[in-house]
Amino acid sequence: MEVPVTVQWVRTSWTKRSRGGEAAARRNAVPVGFALPDDAPPLAHVVEIREWEDFTPCDGRAELRHVSTELRRVDGRLRVFPRVMHELPPRPRRPPAVRLVPGQWVRWQLNYRFSSAAGVRDWSYWLDTFNIAFGRVTADVFLGTPDFHVDEQGPVR
């Protein structure tokens, strides 16, 4: 029997308007883990939180292949390694992949900074949080403390 994999992808998006003050406090109060819906696996539970929606979580589902994370089973373990979607902030040296045994989970965080090609729009930012569990889980698994936490956030100025 194959060990199940549960994926939750939390993406928080904002602009310069939320870089300070009350808006930044609301952004910083956004959770990085949510209770799972009953029907998530084998699909990924995707939670999007956007500044222009007052940082109100909106959840949905995605096929695992659409989640920008490499998940590979090797020797009874799950190798987890998120793909970097954009070059800013620079990541000169990435941490190694995490290898989970059944019953473990990882929280991996990456952030990004974007601008429009013509410089017309303000900078915008993303924080991607990948909560990934290997093995059977309860709906509240990602509300707790992970076995591994990889913080790959860089300066976004």
Image (tube, grey):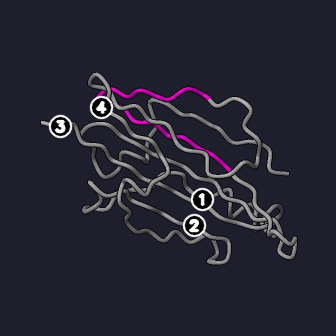
Q: Residue 73 falls in which quadrant of the image?
A: top left
Q: Which amino acid does label 3 sit on?
A: Glu
Q: In this view, does 48 lie to the left or right of 52?
A: left
What residue is at 41 percent from the left and 43 percent from the top? 132
Q: Where is residue 16 in the image (x, y as percent from the top left)?
A: 82, 66
Magenta stretch contains residue 8: no
Q: Which is closer to the viewer, label 3 or label 2?
A: 3
Magenta: predominant secondary structure element? strand
Of 113 and 105, nearer the camera is 113
Q: Which residue lies furthest to the top in this view?
A: 75
Q: Position of residue 48 (x, y in %)?
A: 53, 66
Q: What stretch is highlighted in magenta?
A: 95-111
Of 4 and 105, nearer the camera is 4
Location of residue 58 with respect to 36 vertically, above or below: below
What residue does disc 4 label? Answer: 103
What residue does disc 1 label? Answer: 30
What residue is at 80 percent from the left and 44 percent from the top? 155
Of 74 and 157, nearer the camera is 74
What residue does disc 3 label? Answer: 2
> For the image shown, how many numbered marks are present on the structure?
4
What residue does disc 2 label? Answer: 49
What residue is at 28 percent from the left and 22 percent from the top? 75
Label 1 near label 2: C-beta < 8 Å? yes
